[in-house]
Image: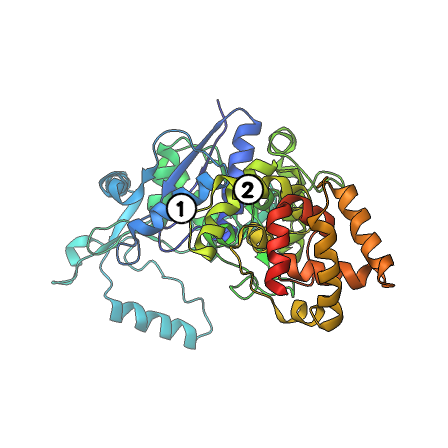
């Protein structure tokens, strides 16, 4: 029997970071075992579910390289199947109609609370004759949960977890309007999809015990459960937007690579020795639920940025140039020419050593493809004082006469100019950097000279003079 896992998000928002990790763990577990990974969209909350959110979930998973087998299952479309199972349980005497009105249930809870008792539903319609039902009350359908003993969940992450049957009430399967509840829909869908392993956040741990009751009542095999600790912020508090609990699309817009984000999510709660950089192929080979920890993981945007920088340096120069091209096109409000892209590719080995995101990489590269006259930022403007401009006048004459425009020759020329004027190298190189890039900080200035070319460099220096 093949391993079958599933990811079942609700389309009420984008693919958030916790959901992305859950999807990744399910995908890796299935692929590690040569099994099947399925996708289910739990769109039963019709008021909050949107097609835009569904599309964002698909897009986020695809961007992260998480592909699914078979067509996605839309839960709402299976409502008749869910109701059918509830009716089968009614016919088998394993479920019953409950005619309690909302007011009656509220009064029951208040009375039990005043006596210090549990406020769970007390089963008052469990064995009553429906013939005694009050007029005008549409009933719900409740499951007859076992009253004695306990349920033991052999969780693949949390270990054995026990809950007494007296802590579970007869849960509702069908609402008064005939619509199925979340608990019923999930169990029926997981069974019909052949799910063998339910891997999800540990905020669903209590749901597992109620769902097990339903599996037993239906006579279906119970899947293995693995409840993963949630992700917390660096301060140990529940992860929120201020920590970085954004949708996957936000990380793409922030300039993170999917390989880096996947690697980072993998290491949030799972480990393989001291390995930090783990390729997708290695992850599939190594992934096992035994290595998932029981403690919450802490999301650290700085660590993600550092990891992203590593993956940037591994990415081909041409690929990175293509990635930053749309950002530069938007920033400069023009199409990039072939010569612009050639410059970016030549500059990329140095640029990518200094950037941690695609956005930062684009910002650092912008001066290469900015049309003259170049904007000069305030720190660079300070370098273009009278001394700096006087050095550039002498240097421009030397550069204009230079026949060999290579880095080593350029460096010799700049050093010779500094010596001839009795200046330190920085007193010439820094104003030169400011004139060529509009900034006080840039890649090595001799490299910049070579990539921009003689004509462009002399023109930019001339603009500053």
Label 2 vs 1, first from the N-terminus:
1
Q: In terms of depth relative to the viewer, which is nearer, 45 or 160?
A: 45
Q: Residue at x 38, y 55 (%)?
A: 13
Q: In terms of depth relative to the viewer, which is nearer, 220 or 433?
A: 433
Q: CA distance from mark 2 to mark 1?
A: 27 Å
Rendered position, 254 above or below 75: below
From this viewpoint, which residue is outermost toward the left? Answer: 135
Q: Is residue 432 visible?
A: yes
In this picture, residue 48 sits left or right of residue 378: left
Q: Quadrant of residue 419?
A: bottom right
Q: In terms of depth relative to the viewer, which is nearer, 145 or 426?
A: 426
Q: Position of residue 320 (x, y in %)?
A: 56, 41
Depth check, mark 2 against mark 1: the one in front is 2
In this picture, residue 248 sits left or right of residue 47: right
Q: In terms of depth relative to the viewer, which is nearer, 305 or 51?
A: 305
User: Mark 2: which secondary structure?
Assistant: helix
From this viewpoint, which residue is outermost toward the top? Answer: 1
Q: Residue 57 — which label?
A: 1
User: Mark 1: which secondary structure?
Assistant: helix
Look at mark 2 in the image and give the residue it sits on. Answer: 321
Q: Position of residue 212 (x, y in %)?
A: 44, 43
Q: Residue at x 87, y 63 (%)?
A: 422
Crowding around mark 1 (Cα neighbors within 10 Å: few <14, some 14 to 19, many 20+) is: many
Q: Is residue 229 visible?
A: no
Q: Residue 401 — which label?
A: none
Rendered position, 387 above or below 167: below
In this picture, residue 348 sits left or right of residue 56: right
Crowding around mark 2 (Cα neighbors within 10 Å: few <14, some 14 to 19, many 20+) is: many
Q: Quadrant of residue 25?
A: top right
């Amino acid at each position: 029997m093949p391993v079958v896992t599933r990811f079942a998000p609700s389309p009420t928002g984008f693919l958030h970071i916790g959901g992305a990790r859950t999807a990744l763990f399910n995908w890796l577990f299935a692929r590690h075992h040569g099994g099947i990974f399925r996708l289910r969209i739990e769109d039963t909350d019709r008021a909050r579910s949107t097609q835009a959110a569904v599309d964002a979930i698909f897009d986020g998973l695809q961007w992260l390289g998480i592909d699914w087998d078979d067509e996605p299952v839309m839960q709402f479309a299976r409502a008749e199947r869910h109701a059918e199972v509830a009716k089968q349980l009614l016919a088998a005497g394993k479920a019953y109609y409950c005619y309690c009105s909302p007011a009656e249930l509220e009064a029951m809870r208040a009375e039990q609370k005043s006596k210090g008792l549990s406020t769970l539903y007390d089963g008052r319609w469990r064995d009553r004759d429906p013939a005694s039902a009050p007029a005008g009350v549409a009933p719900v359908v409740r499951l007859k949960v076992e009253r004695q003993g306990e349920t033991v969940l052999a969780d693949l992450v949390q270990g054995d977890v026990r809950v007494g049957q007296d802590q579970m009430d007869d849960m509702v399967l069908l609402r008064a309007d005939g619509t199925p509840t979340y608990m019923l829909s999930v169990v029926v869908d997981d069974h019909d999809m052949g799910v063998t392993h339910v891997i999800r956040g540990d905020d669903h741990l209590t749901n597992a015990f109620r769902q097990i009751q339903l599996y037993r009542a239906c006579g279906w095999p119970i899947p293995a459960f693995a409840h993963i600790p949630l992700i917390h912020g660096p301060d140990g508090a529940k992860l929120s937007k201020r920590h970085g609990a954004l949708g996957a699309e936000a990380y793409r817009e922030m300039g993170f690579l999917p390989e880096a984000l996947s690697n980072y999510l993998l290491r949030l709660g799972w480990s393989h020795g001291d390995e930090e950089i783990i390729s997708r192929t290695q992850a599939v080979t190594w992934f096992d639920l035994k290595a998932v920890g029981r403690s919450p993981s802490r999301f650290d945007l700085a660590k993600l940025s550092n990891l992203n920088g590593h993956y940037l340096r591994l990415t081909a120069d041409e690929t990175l140039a293509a990635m930053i091209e749309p950002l530069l096109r938007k920033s400069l409000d023009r199409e990039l020419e072939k010569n612009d892209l050639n410059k970016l590719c030549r500059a990329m080995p140095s640029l990518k050593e200094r950037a941690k995101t695609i956005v930062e990489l684009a910002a650092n590269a912008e001066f290469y493809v900015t049309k003259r006259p170049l904007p000069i930022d305030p720190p660079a403007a300070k370098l273009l004082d009278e001394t700096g401009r006087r050095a550039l006048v002498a240097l421009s004459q030397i550069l204009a006469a230079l026949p060999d425009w290579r880095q080593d020759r350029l460096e010799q020329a700049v050093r010779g100019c500094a010596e001839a004027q009795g200046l330190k190298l920085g007193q010439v190189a820094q104003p030169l950097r400011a004139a060529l890039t509009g900034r006080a900080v840039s890649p090595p200035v001799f490299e910049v000279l070579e990539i921009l070319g003689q004509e462009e460099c002399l023109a930019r220096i001339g603009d500053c003079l």
